[in-house]
C-alpha cells in the first residue's frame, strides 16, 4: 500500500507540475498574443508615419523641381537683361560722347560768335 500512496503522490505531483506548466504556457501564450497585438498596432502607426513622411518627401521633391525650374527661368531672364544692359551701356556711352562733341561744337560756335561780335565792333 505504501507503493500505491507513493504512486498516488507521484501522480498528484505530476498533475500539479503539469498544471503549473500548462498555466505557465498559457501565460506565455497570452503574453505573446498581447505582444503580437502591440507590435501590430505599432506597425500600423509606423506605416502611417512612413506614408506621411513619403508624402512630405514627394512634396519637397516637387517643390525642389519647381524651384529649379524657376531658377533656370530667372537665370535666363538675368542673362537677357544683362545683354540688354550691356547694349544700353554702350548706347548711353555713345550718347555721352555725342553730348561732349555737341558741347565742344557749341563752345566753338560761341567763341566764333564772340570773335565775330568783337570784330564787328
Image (spheres, rainbow, N blue to C red):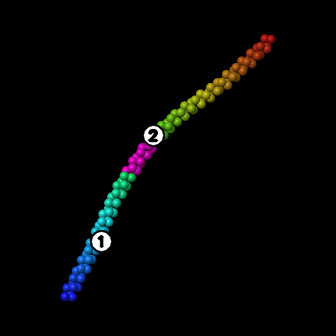
Residue located farthest toward the right when viewing the structure as drawn: 121
Dividing the picture into quarters, in which one does residue 14 lie? Answer: bottom left
| Total numbered circles | 2
Left or right: 121, with 51 as reference point: right
| Residue beneath the point at 76% across and 16% down | 114
Q: Position of residue 58 (x, y in %)?
A: 40, 46
The residue at which mark 1 appears reads as 24
| Residue beneath the point at 50% across and 35% down | 77
**Badge 2 element:** helix
Residue located farthest toward the top when viewing the structure as drawn: 120
Please give the label number shown on residue 69: 2
Left or right: 112, with 75 as reference point: right
* Viewer-closest of 65 and 33: 33
Q: Mark 1 to mark 2: distance in Å? A: 66 Å
Dividing the picture into quarters, in which one does residue 65 lie? Answer: top left
Does 67 lie within the magenta span? yes
Q: Is residue 67 above or below residue 3?
A: above
- Crowd band around label 1 with a 10 angstrom C-alpha radius: few (<14), some (14–19), many (20+): few
Q: Is residue 41 above or below residue 87?
A: below
| Residue beneath the point at 40% across and 50% down | 53
| Residue beneath the point at 21% across and 88% down | 2
Does 34 lie within the magenta span? no
Q: Position of residue 32 (x, y in %)?
A: 31, 65
Q: Position of residue 1 (x, y in %)?
A: 19, 88
Query: Which SS type dominates the magenta stretch?
Result: helix
Q: Position of residue 79 (x, y in %)?
A: 52, 36
* Viewer-closest of 116 and 22: 22
Q: Is residue 13 above or below residue 95?
A: below
Start and end of the magenta stretch?
Answer: 50-69
Amino acid at each position: 500500500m505504501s507503493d500505491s500512496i507513493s504512486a498516488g503522490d507521484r501522480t498528484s505531483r505530476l498533475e500539479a507540475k503539469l498544471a503549473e506548466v500548462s498555466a505557465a504556457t498559457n501565460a506565455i501564450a497570452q503574453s505573446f498574443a498581447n505582444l503580437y497585438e502591440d507590435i501590430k498596432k505599432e506597425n500600423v502607426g509606423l506605416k502611417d508615419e512612413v506614408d506621411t513622411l513619403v508624402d512630405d518627401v514627394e512634396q519637397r521633391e516637387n517643390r525642389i523641381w519647381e524651384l529649379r525650374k524657376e531658377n533656370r527661368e530667372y537665370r535666363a531672364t538675368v542673362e537677357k537683361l544683362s545683354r540688354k544692359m550691356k547694349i544700353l551701356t554702350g548706347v548711353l556711352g555713345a550718347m555721352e560722347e555725342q553730348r561732349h562733341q555737341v558741347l565742344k561744337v557749341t563752345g566753338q560756335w560761341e567763341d566764333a560768335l564772340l570773335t565775330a561780335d568783337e570784330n564787328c565792333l
